[in-house]
Amino acid sequence: MGNAHKKESKNISWDEQDQTNVMQRPYPQIFGRYLLLKPITDGGMASISLARHLGGLEGDKTSGHDLHLADKLMAIKTIKLDWSRDESFQQMFKDEIRIIFGLNHPNIVQSYDYGFQQEQLYLAMEYIEGYNLREYQVKLKKIKKWFSIDTIAYITKNICQGLNHAHKYKNRLTGENFEIVHRDISPDNIMITNDGMIKIIDFGVAKAINNLNRTNTGMVKGKSSYMAPEYLLDQKGLTHLSDQFATGLILWELLTGRKCFNHHEDMKNLTDIMECKIPNPKDINPKVPDELAQIALKSLSKDPSNRFEDMQEMADELSIFLSKHYPDFKESKIKKYAQHLFSDEINEHTNSLVELGRINISVFKQKMQENKEVHTRKTGVTSFLEEEDQDAYEHDLTNEHIIKARHDTEENYHFKVFVPEKDDDEKTPVNPAEKFKKIAGRIVKNAP
């Protein structure tokens, strides 16, 4: 897919790139403070690219130091142009940022940066080297093998721990409880890294119950075969227990080797979910221990009040099960699955990263500086300022203390106070602190 994009886009000039989606431009390409190396996925609304964080590219010009001291791989999610220009989608993207940006847990993919670059909304995330749970299932079925019982319990426990963090997330600066619900827990959104870590991804349709309530009535989000019955009955009744039901379905699926609701037609799946007649996994796979079967069935209770109180309680039960029946279990066992099932892919990927690491970034650093200089000549100050702020800025050029907002290449917004030499004929200058509050306040108010 990457070669096809390169061939199709090879004649696109640097200036023309600003009017095209990321996936239509040649790789590698500059994107703010990042160098996009190659495409990962390309969806209808967004694309994800592997990127190299370029760090402090400008350096200290007076001393000649280059501040690019280290390398970090990241995944950059870019919203396609048409959607980035859509006001309602912009609001949805801002909602997503407000929901997920503060999450910080080893079982949740981390978000590092966000903004608006080359007319596209973007989110910079942790780059996960690994494969999702669905890909593991496919690989195992091909070789007619399956996960061991202890591995199943361990994977599920980690999903529970990550979700518990999201469900109980509180903004530490405001004290606000978000009560985040993922709404799309499924094997496709559970990653297992090549080092054996379990990561929950794609909070794109997550909802903060107490803070954001913009989902249109009748709009169901998530995969039909992993929805909870109460979500189908009344979306307003959506709680963290709906995520628990989806997690229970994953556990049930891992124990039995098949999906619980597996009709090709969504409506049949939804009908079965509403009835919620879940077979005991032990009836399908006699090797399933009673305790683990009961954990799965409890999380799959039709009545949410009969499920575990929260994801931590479910995680605790799984921990007790592991300690009791598999006291010698080691987390490194998960890594061995990755090395056994995906050894060829991992080696190929490792070699490709080394090749990408040989890209001479000095060329891109130079182009980035040129783009910045062109941008400065065209705009004078910054396109981030609204028109009224721009007028206010230009009007204040006669003041002794000037507050200037500079839009640098990395999409960061820095405020600088310039104090020129005082003219004897000038009146008393405006208080710089008050001027800062006035301009900065308007900018922060309208920021994503």
Image: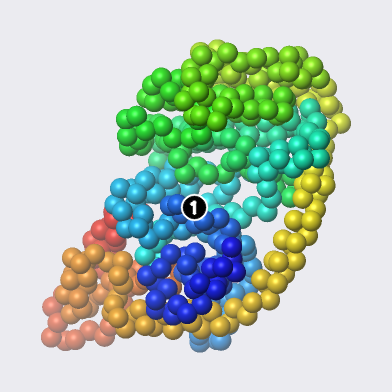
* Residue lying at 48% horizontally and 19% vertically, measured from the top left: 271
**Residue position marked by numbered label 1 in the rendering:** 43
**Amino acid type, label 1:** Gly
Q: Picture quarter containing residue 301?
A: top right
Closest to the observer, 437 or 371: 371
Q: Quadrant of residue 406?
A: bottom left
Q: Residue at x 35, y 78 (%)?
A: 375
Task: Tell me, yes or no, if residue 290 can be seen here.
Answer: yes
Q: In this picture, is 387 found above or below 139?
A: below
Q: Residue at x 23, y 61 (%)?
A: 438
Say if 19 sits above or below 293 in the image. Answer: below
User: With 438 as the anchor, is 25 left or right in this view?
Assistant: right
Q: Is residue 359 left or right of residue 268?
A: right
Residue 85 is situated, as x and y percent measured from the top left of the image, at 32, 58
List x then y, in percent, for residue 208.
Answer: 42, 35
Residue 60 appearing in the image? no
Q: With respect to residue 250, does 351 lie above or below? A: below
Pick whichever, 174 or 234, lies toward us. Answer: 234
Q: How many neighbours does mark 1 have within 10 angstroms: few (below 14), some (14-19), or many (20 or more)?
A: few
- Circle 1: element type: loop
Where residue 345 sits: x, y (%)? Answer: 75, 56
Q: How many marks?
A: 1
* Color style of the picture: rainbow
